[in-house]
Image (tube, coloured by chain):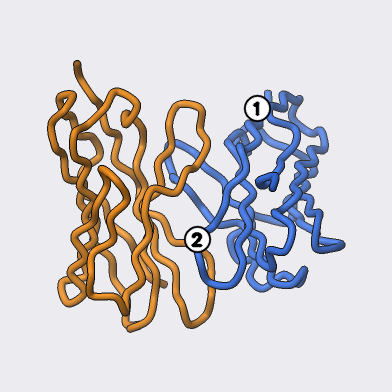
Amino acid sequence: AQTVTQSQPEMSVQEAETVTLSCTYDTSESDYYLFWYKQPPSRQMILVIRQEAYKQQNATENRFSVNFQKAAKSFSLKISDSQLGDAAMYFCAYRSAVSGYALNFGKGTSLLVTP
Amino acid sequence: DAGVIQSPRHEVTEMGQEVTLRCKPISGHNSLFWYRQTMMRGLELLIYFNNNVPIDDSGMPEDRFSAKMPNASFSTLKIQPSEPRDSAVYFCASSLGVGELFFGEGSRLTVL
């Protein structure tokens, strides 16, 4: 099974600053999807951004962008101009595009945003 | 369009009681997933349905857990009998094809 590793249990960033959350994964497949989900205290799982492995261009959604390094199997999330509302748990996830199987999640990174 | 709807949002029960969690996926989605979230183990896949058929239930902890999907718009996760170690947040999610999963708000279960 594919494994997803988030090596930073906790991160902290000041409001308006930039922070990068790390994620690595292990797979032998060439076709897959990667996701970042946000889970605020309300516990709702919210999709932040997605990346198709066949696309070389890094995905961007407003203040959120990824650095996808396929050969290195790395998928980091950059949050620019951090806001208090960005404080949450962030989960990196992998999904096979071949088998259409379920998401494999990392353990999560807790992001604290300080004023 | 409504998102994934789960009920109940909170459930407190006594050990040994039966618990039934319910899920209505997004209309048109063909895959449904049940996940369990705990502090110790994170997000674990319990079972995955595709076109109402269970594809993989290897994540179901033991025989006390069972899941059904009688039609495309409804699924249940049942625990009988419940134990304190079953206390967790249970998420239902659905998807269309191999894209992202859309999650419900989760059901927080506390077994005393």
Question: Which residue is label 2 attached to?
Answer: B100
Q: Nearer the viewer, residue A54 or B6?
A: A54
Which label is found at residue A40? none
Residue that sits furthest to the front in the current view = A62
Colour applied to chain B: blue
**Vertical arrangement, residue A47 with respect to residue A101, above or below:** above
- N-term-proximal mark, 2 vs 1: 2
Within-10-Å neighbours for mark 1: few <14, some 14–19, many 20+: some
Q: Position of residue A51 (x, y in %)?
A: 34, 65
Q: Is residue A64 left or right of residue A81?
A: right
Subunit under mark 2: B
Q: Quadrant of residue A90?
A: top left
**Snapshot quadrant of residue B70:** bottom right
What separation in Å lies between label 2 and label 1 (alpha carbons)?
29 Å
Q: Residue at x 36, y 36 (%)?
A: A89
Task: Determine the residue positioned at 74% across, 29% down.
Answer: B15
A76 on left or right of A92: left
Q: Secondary structure at mark 2?
A: loop
What residue would you read off at disc 1? Answer: B110
Chain A palette colour: orange
Mark 2 nearby-residue class (10 Å; few <14, some 14–19, many ≥20): many
The residue furthest right is B70
Q: Secondary structure at mark 1?
A: strand
Question: Residue A75 placed where, x, y %?
Answer: 24, 61
Q: In the rendered view, would you say A30 is above or below B42?
A: below
